[in-house]
Image (tube, rainbow, N blue to C red):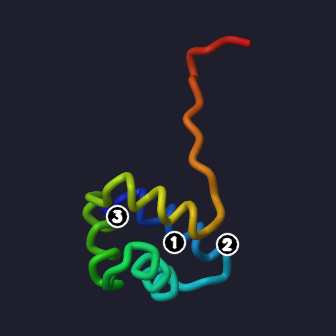
Amino acid sequence: MKNPILNEVKNLVSDRDITLTQLTAKMGERLGRTYSLASLSQKLRNGTIPYHEIRLIADILNYKIIFYDLHKRK
């Protein structure tokens, strides 16, 4: 079974009309080191991608991660 984060990132990348390869290149630029597609794919498949990398992906794709309190009443 695929990890849901893999499908989510694939959908977000597709919505921005870039490839995972382009995303990894941009991640490498921002991180100042080589970042491979194989590494990203493995982390997404295994569900082991660190939160700071998810934040980086969101930033590159121009998304904002928001935590919403489901118990808070209006």
Q: Residue drawn 61% across and 68% down? A: 61
Calculate the distance from the C-alpha at mark 3 to the C-alpha at mark 2: 20 Å
Q: Which residue is mark 1?
A: 10
Q: Which mark is residue 15?
A: 2
User: From what the image shows, is residue 55 above or below residue 31?
Assistant: above
Identify the mark nearer the N-term, 1 or 3.
3
Q: Residue 18's x, y, as percent?
A: 60, 83
Calculate the distance from the C-alpha at mark 1 to the C-alpha at mark 3: 12 Å
Identify the mark nearer the N-term, 3 or 2.
3
Is 44 left, or right, of 58 in this rendering? Answer: left
In the foreground, 53 or 70: 53
Q: Residue drawn 57% across and 69% down? A: 60
Q: Which residue is mark 3?
A: 2
Picture quarter containing residue 6? bottom left
| Element type at mark 1 | helix
Is 34 left, or right, of 16 in this rendering? Answer: left
Identify the mark nearer the N-term, 2 or 1.
1
Q: Residue 5's x, y, as percent?
A: 42, 58
Q: Are marks 2 and 1 in contact (CB under 8 Å)?
A: no
Residue at far right of view: 74
Disc 1 residue type?
Lys
Disc 3 residue type?
Lys
